[in-house]
Amino acid sequence: MSESASNTKNSRNSNRVQPHKHCRICQEAIPSKTEPRVCKQEECITKNEKNEKNQKQIRVLMLVFFGIFALPFIASIVLQVI
């Protein structure tokens, strides 16, 4: 290995950033073991809770609409077999 390559490798290891995550709302650095992935600001916590609630509602609605459109298809297959 050349000397310049080994120096570059050593400098990368000495300048490493501590493992961390970022807040989903404000992108502030937070500890890597933090769950849910938001900082301790009240605004970020409430926005995250609101986002999670909306995502859950959207998932339920998608399942309902999928069921509405899949039910006639499945029923027609079942009726053909009978």
Image (spheres, helix red, strand yellow):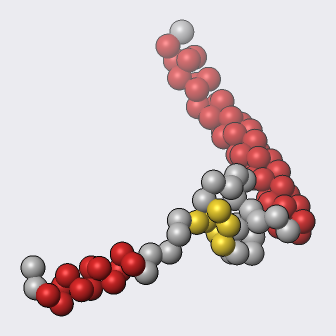
Q: Is residue 80 above or below residue 47?
A: above
Using residue 4 as the reference point, say whether residue 60 is left or right of it: right
Q: Residue shown at 68%/55% (left/top)? A: 34
- The residue most toward the left is 1
Q: Residue at x 54, y 9 (%)?
A: 82
Picture coordinates of residue 54, whole percent (x, y): 81, 54
Horizontal and vertical percent position of residue 55: 75, 53
Query: Which of the two residues, 41 or 17, is positioned nearer the viewer here?
Result: 17
What is the number of callouts on the image? 0
Q: What residue is drawn where x is 59% and y is 31%?
A: 73
Q: Is residue 54 visible?
A: no
Q: Quadrant of residue 4?
A: bottom left
Residue 40 location (% of width, % of height): 82, 64
66 over 32 or under it: above or below: above
Quadrant location of the N terminus?
bottom left
**In the image: residue 37, left or right of residue 11:** right
- Within the image, what quadrant is residue 20 found in? bottom right
Which of the 4 quarters of the picture holds residue 37?
bottom right
As drawn, is 76 to the left or to the right of 55? Answer: left
Relative height, residue 9 to residue 49 (above, below): below
Q: Is residue 50 above or below residue 15?
A: above
Q: Residue furthest top?
A: 82
**One can see residue 32 in this view:** yes
Toward the bottom, the furthest residue is: 4
11 or 53, nearer to the observer: 11
Q: Residue at x 43, y 81 (%)?
A: 15
Q: Where residue 32 appears, x then y in whole percent?
A: 60, 59
